[in-house]
Image: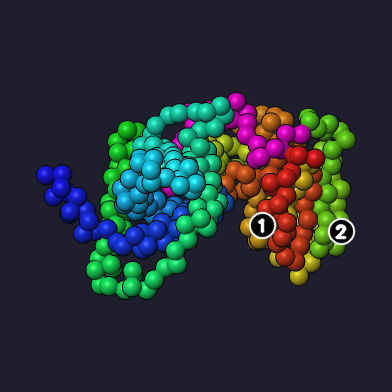
Amino acid sequence: MASRATRALRRFEPPPRAVDWSIFALVVFETLSGVLSLGAGHPANGLLFVAHGVAGLSLVVLVGFKLYRVRRRVLDSRLRDRHTSLSVLLAVVALAALGTGVAWVLGVEVRIGFWTLLNVHIGFGLLVLPILLVHLRARFRPPRRVDFAERRRALQYGAILVFGAATYRATETVGALRGVGRRFTGSRPLPPGEGNDAFPVTSWVADDPDPIDPDSWSLSVAGLVDRPLELGRTDLAPDETRSVLLDCTSGWYTEQNWTGVRLGDALDTAGVHSSARWVTVRSVTGFRWSFPIAEAREMLLATRVGGEPLSHGHGAPLRLVAPNRRGFQWVKWVDAVEVRRRRDPAQWLAVLVSGFS
C-alpha cells in the first residue's frame, strides 16, 4: 500500500533540478511578498497576502519532495559531507517558517517573550533566503530547459498550485471555525477597549526614547513650503476626532478614537509649493516615513486616543494616524514634517537604525 502511494506521488514530482530551482523561486517570492506585506495595509492589497499564503503552502509540497529525495544523505553518516549540516539547518528553518505561518492562521496562541507567533514566522522567513543562498553556492547545479519543458511539467506544477490554494482555503476555514477573527493582513483583533491601555506599546526595532518634555518640544514643518513653521504644544489645538483602525505588524489590530489636528491643515498654513509630491514625517529618534502628499493631507497628527492624552509609549506628545497603513508607519514622537519633491530614499535605512544612536 505504501509503495503504491509512493508511486502515485512520484507522478506529481518534477525532476530534482526543477524541484530545487522551484524552491529557490518560491523562497525569493515569499521573502519579497512578505517584506512588501509589512507595509500593505489597504484592503486593495489583499491579493498580496493570498498569493503569499498559496505560494507558502505550495512550497510545503516541494520541500517534502526535496526532503524525501535527500533523506538517505542525511540519515546515513557514510553519505554525509561538510555541507550536510548547512542543509539540515536550512530544512529546520524553512519548516519552522512554514509551520509557524500555518499555526498562526489556525489560531494557535504561543508567545516567545514579547514576540507573537507571527513575529516568529517573519523572523524564520527572513532567515531562509540567506541560508538558501549559501546552500546554493555549496551545491550549485544550473537549471536545464529539459527539466521544465514537458507538458507533463505544467500539469505537475498546476497540481501543486491547486494543492496550495485548496490548503490555503482549508486553513482559513478552520481558523474561522475556531473563532480566529483575522484581517486580510493576518492580524487578530484585541479585546474591546478604549484609550492607552486598550492596545500594547510596541516599537519598531530599537525606538525607545526618553519621555519628551512637552514644554520644550516643538514640531517643524519645512521643505517645499512658503512659510516654514515651528509649532509648540499650545499651537496645536486638537479639533478633529476620528475612529481609525491600527493594524500592527506584530499581529494585532484595534480601532480607536484619535483626536488631533489634520496634517493637511498644517501644510496649508505653511503653504505648499506646486512642485511638492511627498511628505516625510519624522520622529525624534530619526525614524521617518514618506507618504504621497494627497494621502498625507488626510492623516491626523494625534495628541489623544480614546479621550485620553497619548501616553509616552504610544507616541506623546504627537503621533501620526495614517489610515490604511500598517502600524510601524504611524510615526510616534513626531517632531518634524518635511515637504519634498521625491520620496525619502533613506527611509528604510532610517527605520532599521533609528533608536540605536
Expressed as whole percent of the image width and height from the top left, the position of residue 40 reads 53, 53
Expressed as whole percent of the image width and height from the top left, the position of residue 80 reads 42, 45
Q: Which residues are magenta?
A: 183-209
Expressed as whole percent of the image width and height from the top left, the position of residue 226 reads 85, 62
Residue 201 forms part of the magenta stretch: yes
- Quarter occupied by residue 215: top right
Name the secondary structure under disc 2: loop
Expressed as whole percent of the image width and height from the top left, the position of residue 32 reads 52, 56
Residues at marks 1 and 2, CA–CA distance in whole angstroms: 21 Å
Q: Neighbour class for label 2 at 10 Å: few (<14), some, many (≥20)? A: some
- Quarter occupied by residue 276: bottom right
The residue singled out by tag 1 in the image is 291
The residue positioned 39% from the left and 55% from the top of the image is 55
Depth check, front residue: 228 or 111: 111
> Mark 1 is on which residue type?
Phe
Q: Is residue 207 above or below residue 262?
A: above
The residue singled out by tag 2 in the image is 227
The residue positioned 48% from the left and 42% from the top of the image is 85
Which of the two labelled residues, at mark 1 and mark 2, occupies the earlier sequence position?
2
Depth check, front residue: 75 or 159: 75
Please state if 183 lies on the left or on the right of 307 as rendered: left
Residue 330 forms part of the magenta stretch: no
